[in-house]
């Protein structure tokens, strides 16, 4: 837990430093073009690469138990190469039809970024599944720190513009890839002879449903940028994109560090003791709720102050969307536990149906409300979609959480404590003007009080990893 916490806090810290520094340097228009193009490549990546990661998470332990990982690696690598060729063709066509010189540059750089990044991402999944927290976090954190340092030099020393955001990541990822291939690719073997139609069909069957779910997830979290661009301006896209990203990063990073820590254990439990996995999942959910609820409450309560610290002046007006993004990101973390169980239960169709309905709700509401009320409603519709997903899946299977009265009572009590703190803050601010330093002090006092109330529960927590 300590290694994963450190490995997530470092990239998260880099992201926090990055946003206030570079939103004061790059313009909303530049961020708008960057956001639209990288999000478009994210859609391509969903169709071409993301399902490979899903397959690796699902089948790694199964193939390892059969001592047949070489077969799995070879077939996944074969698909990866084919997907990369398709991405190259798409990028080439887009480049040929684009007219804006900046757009052309961003297209070329985005192709190279995703081509390298996706391969490294697959390797890091193997590292995580093996429980090698130190190696994983050294690579993951090193990429974030080095790319930030290089970006700083490229912009403030050599005065490069928005393309340097992609170039800095590409240069560092090339170095990391070379390091992996030369020094840390132990037991990572490939063979043309191991490529088989049977294995490819197994991967395709599982991955195709996962692809639909991943595509719908991306549709929910990013399609609003296109609709904002359609009915508002590229500047609005840039502001919304940066505010959304910094808000999501703060919560998703905390959720990710927890999920990364427990995921290998949970995967093994689902593989060898599926019926008994509910107890383990319930324990994990209780821990996430106990610590996650105060964090998203305080983040939401102090959104304006967070925006003032972390965002450039032109971007601070977007603070009104931050509470919706914080809550949506936390709901996503809760959803991960039910999604992984459904995958092992072969309920892939249920996942796909839920995701399709949620994405239709999201896109439909965006087309209705963004033209009427602006980009703020994009965050609200995303929250509504995630709330639907949470209810849709947990009504079908609560992972045994609701059958544990101790967990349920503690969560309700936690919500009452946090609601009281929110009322106290709003009351104080109605009488007094509280500056940023007093706000920080207030947040610390609230959190210390919360930890004091739940100190016995925290001491008795058991987190199997």
Image: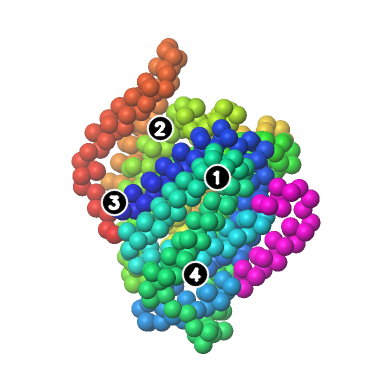
User: Which residue is depicted at the point 59% across and 73% down?
Assistant: 81
Going from N to C along the chain, the mark reached first, 1 or 3, is 3
Q: Report whether 266 appears left or right of 329.
A: left
Percent x, y of residue 187: 38, 76
**Frontmost residue, 383 versus 75:** 75
Percent x, y of residue 252: 45, 47
Q: Could you say which disc has been placed on residue 305 in the image?
A: none
**Frontmost residue, 113 versus 122:** 113
Q: Magenta segment: does it hold 100?
A: yes
Name the quarter where the C terminus is drawn: bottom left
For disc 3, the neighbor class at 10 Å (few under 14, some 14 to 19, many from 20) is few
Q: Mark 4 points at which residue?
A: 55
Distance CA(mark 4)–CA(mark 1): 38 Å
Q: Could you say which disc has been placed on residue 2 in the image?
A: 3
Q: Magenta segment: does it hold 227?
A: no
Distance CA(mark 2)–CA(mark 1): 36 Å
- Label 3 or label 2, whichever lies nearer to me, is 3
For disc 2, the neighbor class at 10 Å (few under 14, some 14 to 19, many from 20) is some
Residue extent of the magenta highlight: 82-106
Q: Name the residue under label 1.
A: 154
Distance CA(mark 3)–CA(mark 2): 23 Å
**Frontmost residue, 309 versus 102:** 102
Going from N to C along the chain, the mark reached first, 4 or 1, is 4
Q: Report whether 163 appears left or right of 191.
A: right
Hey, which quadrant is residue 458 in on the image?
Answer: top left
User: Which residue is depicted at the point 49% across and 83% down?
Assistant: 191
User: Which residue is depicted at the point 50% across and 48% down?
Assistant: 150
Hey, which quadrant is residue 229 in on the image?
Answer: top right
Q: In this view, does 32 lie above or below 440?
A: below
Dot 2 falls on a residue whose secondary structure is: helix
């Amino acid at each position: 837990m300590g290694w994963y916490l450190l490995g997530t806090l470092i990239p998260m810290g880099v992201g926090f430093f990055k946003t206030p520094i570079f939103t004061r340097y790059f313009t909303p228009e530049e961020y708008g073009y960057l956001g639209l193009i990288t999000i478009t490549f994210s859609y391509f990546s969903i169709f071409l690469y993301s399902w490979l990661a899903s397959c690796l998470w699902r089948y790694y332990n199964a193939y390892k138990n059969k001592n047949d990982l070489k077969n799995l690696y070879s077939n996944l690598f074969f698909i990866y190469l084919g997907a990369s060729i398709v991405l190259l063709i798409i990028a080439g066509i887009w480049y040929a039809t684009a007219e804006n010189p900046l757009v052309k540059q961003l297209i070329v750089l985005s192709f190279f970024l995703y081509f390298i990044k996706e391969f490294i991402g697959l390797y890091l999944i193997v590292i995580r599944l093996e429980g090698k927290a130190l190696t994983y976090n050294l690579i993951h954190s090193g990429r974030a720190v080095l790319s930030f340092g290089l970006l700083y030099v490229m912009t403030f020393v050599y005065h490069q513009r928005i393309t340097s955001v992609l170039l800095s990541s590409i240069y560092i990822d090339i170095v990391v890839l070379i390091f992996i291939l030369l020094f840390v690719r132990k037991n990572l073997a490939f063979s043309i002879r191991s490529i088989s139609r049977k294995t490819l069909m197994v991967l395709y069957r599982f991955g195709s449903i996962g692809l639909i779910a991943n595509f719908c997830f991306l549709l929910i979290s990013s399609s609003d940028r296109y609709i904002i661009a359609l009915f508002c301006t590229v500047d609005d896209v840039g502001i919304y994109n940066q505010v959304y990203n910094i808000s999501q990063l703060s919560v998703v990073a905390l959720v990710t560090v927890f999920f990364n820590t427990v995921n290998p254990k949970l995967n093994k439990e689902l593989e060898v003791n599926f019926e008994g996995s509910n107890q383990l999942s319930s324990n994990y959910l209780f821990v996430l709720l106990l610590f996650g609820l105060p964090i998203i409450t305080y983040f939401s309560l102090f959104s304006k102050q967070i925006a003032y610290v972390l965002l450039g002046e032109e971007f601070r007006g977007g603070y009104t969307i931050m509470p919706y993004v914080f809550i949506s990101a936390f709901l996503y973390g809760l959803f991960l536990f039910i999604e992984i169980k459904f995958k092992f239960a072969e309920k892939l169709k249920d996942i796909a149906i839920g995701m399709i309905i949620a994405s239709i709700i999201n896109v439909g509401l965006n087309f209705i409300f963004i033209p009427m009320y602006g980009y703020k409603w994009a965050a609200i519709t995303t929250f509504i979609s995630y709330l639907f997903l949470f209810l849709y899946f947990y009504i079908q299977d609560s992972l045994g959480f609701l059958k544990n009265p101790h967990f349920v009572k503690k969560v309700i009590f936690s919500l009452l404590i946090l609601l009281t703190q929110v009322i106290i803050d709003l009351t104080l601010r109605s009488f007094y003007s509280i500056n940023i330093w007093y706000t920080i002090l207030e947040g610390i006092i609230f959190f210390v009080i919360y930890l004091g109330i739940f100190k016995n529960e925290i001491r008795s927590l058991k987190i199997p990893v």
